[in-house]
């Protein structure tokens, strides 16, 4: 029998002390800095011959110089350069990777808060919605790691040289943790080669040269001085005559367009009244005969109402080209006859559109044979729309009634003379196609549809 262990005097439970979770405030730069120093000790080593420069304004330099940043770093390897011509910058050398992340996070974080107007009392506190954006420079002699741009998020090396002999590195990210990790990893992968005092001198000269070049470019632009390129008085005098002529031409055009649009509806009304007068001609009653029935001794007469126009124009077996007698059944037509009728409807539509203003918005209709040609129109629909800038739609049964008034106003019989067409195709053998747009575009669309029907016969 084994010996029982003596119970712990302090109560039940293990004597092993539980490891406390390493918590930190992700919006505090100091808390993130201390956490990353405990998490990765390799970023706490001094990078040999390291030099990084950040271009700043005089106000930014004074703010950073009087802040707690220098006290926290406790390092003499941070230099603030204030020049009389307004060219100021910050230079850090022989730094640790984590120290560079702390410096850039402090500078970019406070800049972002100023841009968005969300300044805080604590300069070390950077909310997550504040963008961490900015640029720093390294000397062109530095060897950059080839694969950092794919691995690190938020760091970009510029391919264009703004300052001579220097490479610009841009930072664009949100959140202190991701920025600190990215900058620490990036700075550790750079091989610095030149000493810091030579790099500082070259950077100052490059900043002066860039400012001088921009100043020369701005002062030598001719349009900044008044009346160098043109004389305002001569220009206004010469353009006044042209503007008056253009104004008069535009006024005449608008008046002619209004007059034309007022004449066209009256002509259409006269045509409609003519049709109504023909329809209201006196009817000729047909002679009726009495029929006796073996079931009833009464006689009945059924009058047949036919007009003179129907007697002269109607075919005895079906529907004719007369717009007033299209309520009866159509004759049988071959596919060639149906196509010829559709071609005639297109020609009649072109003639009707040309009689209107080329700038009037119209909606016209044509008929297309259902067999073979409807598929051809569908195949060329996108091309027709792009070339004519018109809305071309093959209509369905639920909206085909919209085209009835247009077809009634067309003189299709004029374009079917000399053909064997004596009646209108049955609705089941054709499809209506609508074309919407201004007059001149509408004519072009109708002509293209006419080419489809004629060339694919």
Image (cartoon, grey):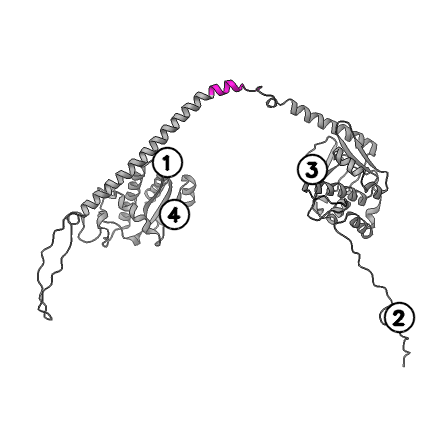
Sequence-wise, the earlier of marks 4 and 3 is 3
Q: Is residue 147 visible?
A: no
- Residue closer to the observer: 23 or 350: 23
The structure residue drawn at horizontal position 41% and vertical position 26%, both measured from the top left corner, is 247
- Which residue is the site of mark 4? 393
Task: Let me know if residue 12 appears in the view.
Answer: yes
Q: Main secondary structure of the magenta part?
A: helix
Magenta-drawn stretch contains 236: yes
Which sits earlier in the primary sequence, circle 3 or circle 1? 3
How far is the residue under mark 3 from the one under mark 2? Answer: 64 Å
The CA span between labels 1 and 4 is: 21 Å
10 Å crowding of disc 3: few (<14), some (14-19), many (20+): few
On the image, which quarter does residue 291 sit in? bottom left
Which is in the foreground here, disc 1 or disc 4? 1
What SS does tag 1 mark?
loop
338 or 127: nearer the eye? 127
Q: Position of residue 197 (x, y in %)?
A: 83, 32
Do labels 3 and 2 touch, CB within 8 Å?
A: no
How many neighbours does mark 4 have within 10 angstroms: few (below 14), some (14-19), or many (20 or more)?
A: some
Q: What residue sits right under mark 2 in the picture?
A: 10
In the depicted view, which residue is nearer to us: 188 or 180?
A: 180
Which of pointers 3 and 2 lies earlier in the amino acid sequence? 2
Q: Earlier in the sequence, mark 1 or mark 4?
A: 1
Tag of residue 158? 3
Please identify the quadrant where the N terminus is shown.
bottom right
């Amino acid at each position: 029998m084994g010996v029982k262990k003596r119970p712990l005097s302090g109560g039940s439970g293990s004597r092993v002390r539980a490891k406390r979770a390493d918590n930190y405030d992700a919006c505090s730069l100091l808390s993130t800095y201390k956490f990353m120093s405990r998490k990765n000790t390799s970023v706490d080593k001094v990078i040999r011959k390291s030099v990084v420069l950040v271009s700043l304004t005089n106000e930014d330099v004074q703010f950073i110089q009087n802040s707690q940043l220098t006290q926290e770093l406790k390092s003499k390897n941070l230099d603030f350069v204030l020049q009389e011509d307004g060219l100021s910058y910050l230079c850090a050398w022989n730094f640790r990777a984590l120290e560079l992340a702390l410096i850039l996070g402090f500078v970019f974080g406070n800049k972002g808060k100023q841009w968005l107007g969300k300044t805080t009392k604590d300069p070390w506190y950077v909310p997550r919605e504040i963008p961490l954006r900015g640029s720093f420079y390294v000397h062109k002699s530095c060897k950059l790691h080839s694969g950092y741009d794919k691995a690190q998020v938020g760091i970009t090396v510029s391919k264009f040289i703004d300052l001579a002999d220097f490479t610009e590195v841009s930072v664009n990210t949100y959140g202190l943790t991701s920025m600190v990790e990215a900058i620490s990893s990036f700075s550790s992968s750079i091989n610095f080669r030149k000493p810091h005092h030579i790099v500082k001198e070259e950077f100052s000269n490059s900043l002066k040269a860039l400012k001088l070049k921009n100043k020369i470019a701005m002062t030598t632009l001719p349009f900044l001085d008044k009346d160098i390129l043109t004389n305002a008085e001569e220009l206004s005098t010469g353009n006044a005559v042209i503007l008056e002529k253009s104004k008069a031409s535009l006024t005449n055009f608008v008046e002619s367009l209004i007059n034309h649009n007022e004449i066209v509806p009256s002509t259409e009304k006269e045509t409609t009244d003519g049709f109504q007068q023909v329809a209201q001609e006196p009817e000729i009653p047909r002679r009726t005969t009495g029929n006796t029935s073996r079931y009833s001794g009464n006689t009945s007469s059924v009058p047949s109402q036919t007009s003179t126009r129907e007697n002269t124009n109607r075919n005895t077996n079906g529907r004719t080209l007369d717009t007033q007698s299209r309520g009866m059944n159509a004759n049988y037509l071959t596919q060639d006859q149906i196509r010829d009728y559709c071609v005639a409807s297109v020609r009649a539509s072109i003639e009707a559109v040309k009689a209107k203003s080329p700038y009037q918005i119209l909606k016209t209709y044509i008929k297309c044979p259902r067999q073979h040609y409807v598929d051809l129109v569908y195949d060329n629909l996108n091309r027709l729309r792009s070339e004519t800038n018109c809305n071309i739609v093959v209509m369905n049964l639920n909206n085909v009634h919209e085209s009835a008034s247009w077809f009634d106003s067309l003189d299709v019989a004029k374009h079917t003379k000399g053909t064997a067409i004596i009646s209108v195709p049955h609705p089941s053998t054709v499809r209506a196609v609508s074309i919407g747009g201004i007059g001149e575009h509408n004519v072009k669309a109708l002509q293209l549809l006419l080419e489809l029907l004629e060339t694919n016969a």
